[in-house]
Image: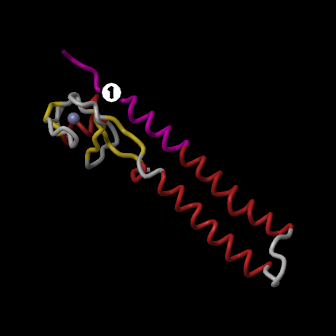
């Protein structure tokens, strides 16, 4: 989960989204590490400004990578398994190949669906925990 989520802030000046290195499971821990209003520098326009920790939010990352990876790996195994099992010089396709297709693609799709859902849910939970303003 940690690998799929990262900390971001939106530049007050140019409104470009910036990534922040490091991680915290909630804003209280983030405050402990960075202070209540860490000064952050925008990579796009170079402007440095203080951002309240509530303005730092979690966003999903690398979601494209596991998707490619899952389909790459599954289609590789699908291909080699189908080749070894069913290739007889002339006809590759039969009912079992269709079953392999289902096993190799529908299962990863289900896993990915659960993963994406979990990431989005974790993101919402993490972003909803704001530090109340005392002033
Ligand atoms: Zn900027």
Decide whether residue 125 is among the magenta residues.
yes
Residue labelled with disc 1: 130
Q: Residue at x 70, y 55 (%)?
A: 106
* Mark 1, other Cα within 10 Å: few <14 / some 14–19 / many ≥20: some
Q: Residue at x 79, y 64 (%)?
A: 99
Point out residue 29 in the picture as x, y percentages from the top left corner. 26, 39
Against 37, is 118 above or below? below
Q: Is residue 9 left or right of residue 112?
A: left
Q: Residue at x 27, y 34 (%)?
A: 28
Residue at the right extreme?
95
Decide whether residue 119 is among the magenta residues.
yes
Q: Mark 1: which secondary structure?
A: loop
Against 57, is 118 above or below? below
Give whichever of 55, 26 is nearer the camera: 55
Give whichever of 115, 98 is nearer the camera: 98
Give whichever of 10, 57 is nearer the camera: 10
Magenta-colored span? 117-135
Q: Quadrant of ligand 1?
A: top left
Point out residue 35 in the picture as x, y percentages from the top left corner. 16, 35
Q: Is residue 126 left or right of residue 34?
A: right
Image-quadrant location for residue 95: bottom right
Image-quadrant location for residue 97: bottom right
Q: Residue at x 75, y 66 (%)?
A: 100
Point out residue 104 in the picture as x, y percentages from the top left corner. 69, 63
Q: Is residue 125 left or right of residue 68?
A: left
Against 116, is 71 above or below? below
């Amino acid at each position: 989960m940690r690998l799929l989520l990262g900390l971001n802030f939106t530049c007050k000046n140019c409104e470009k989204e910036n990534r922040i290195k490091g991680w915290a499971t909630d804003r209280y821990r983030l405050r402990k590490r960075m202070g209540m209003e860490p000064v952050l520098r925008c990579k796009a326009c170079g402007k440095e400004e203080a951002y309240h920790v509530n303005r730092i939010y979690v966003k999903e990352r690398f979601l494209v990578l596991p998707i490619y990876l899952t389909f790459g790996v599954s289609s590789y195994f699908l291909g080699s398994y189908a080749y070894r099992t069913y290739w007889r010089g002339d006809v590759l396709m039969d009912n079992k190949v269709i079953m392999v297709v289902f096993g190799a693609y529908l299962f990863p799709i289900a896993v990915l669906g659960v993963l994406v859902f979990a990431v989005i849910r974790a993101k919402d939970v993490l972003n909803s925990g704001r530090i109340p303003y005392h002033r």
